[in-house]
Amino acid sequence: MRIPLDIEFIFTANPEDYTNRGSIVTPLKDRIGSQILTHYPKTVSMGKEITQQEAKINPAQKQQVEVGDLLKTLIEMIAVEARQSEFVDAKSGVSARLTISAYENLVSTAERRMLLNGEANTFARIGDLAGVVSAINGKIELVYEGEQEGAAMVSQSLIGKAIRNHFTTLFPDPGKLKKKKQASPYQKILDWFSENNEVDILLGDTDKAYKQTLDAIPALEDLVKMLSDTNKPLGNDKYLIKEFILHALAEHSQIGKAYLERGVQFKDLFGSVFSTKDLDEGEEESN
């Protein structure tokens, strides 16, 4: 007697397996008996849906930690950059597990700061992507050149490229503006830093201190308005975008960025170059 069963089998694997035996894990192919073509999420929005569906974020975290859409997009962009990176082994693949783990780490990094500062709630920042480095390191395999660079350096580079490339989808490309000799909407920000101004954004800053630091750069407000919708207030996203602009301008070599022990410092690009040169010369003299 044959009983018809309404059953659907779902098989999953990386686009290329870890043993270089083909486009799908051989034992899985043997059991299915068919050749199956797999692929990464075809769009960033599709990747975001998968990540939000699979990330294990408990109700308390969802209520206490706000994650802006900008950061959700950057998490996916990191995976996109990893899949194209010359330092990452393409044969091993970069699965959605990277973005899922990265998103969970992002939320936990913001939650940890909230608890240490005794705050009732908080929102994730660009600086919280520092907590994503360990997730990236654990979900990618590096080629020889990547191993020489170091896992942490490769991960930081992937984050930087994600910020750099996503920035030009929202704002004018600084490089193209310079080539075409067009007026730059970033000039007021550059002028502010050229007047010996600098800002330190520390990972442990309270939300109040974080906002005050970004509000100290008045020219950022004008750029934020380029993305604002008068019918929908930006709220905390306003400060997320402000920090994003600073990181992106640094990635585009418009301003200088230096890593501190627990944060980053932004300052004039030429000033940072000269200070580094003076430091090197001082070390040579002492030697």
Image (cartoon, rainbow, N blue to C red):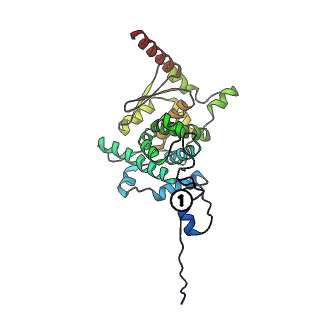
Task: Name the residue at 54% across, 25% down.
Answer: 190
For label 1, the crowd category at 10 Å Cα-Cα, with few meaning under 14, some 14 to 19 and many 20 or more, is some
The x, y position of residue 173, in whole percent, is: 63, 34
The x, y position of residue 103, in whole percent, is: 45, 49
Image quarter (top left, top right, bottom left or bottom right) of the C terminus: top left
| Position above or below: 216 against 21 | above
> Could you say which is closer to the camera, residue 29 or residue 179?
29
> Could you say which is closer to the camera, residue 49 or residue 5?
5
Left or right of residue 213: residue 162 = right
The x, y position of residue 208, in whole percent, is: 37, 37
> Could you say which is closer to the camera, residue 227 or residue 154?
154
Task: Name the residue at 60% across, 41% down.
Answer: 170
For mark 1, what is the residue?
13
Give the total of numbered labels. 1
In the rendered image, which quarter is residue 168 located in? top right
Task: Name the residue at 58% across, 26% down.
Answer: 187
| Position above or below: 24 against 118 | below
Most distant residue in the right direction:
180
| Position above or below: 50 against 156 | below
**Residue 224 visible here:** no
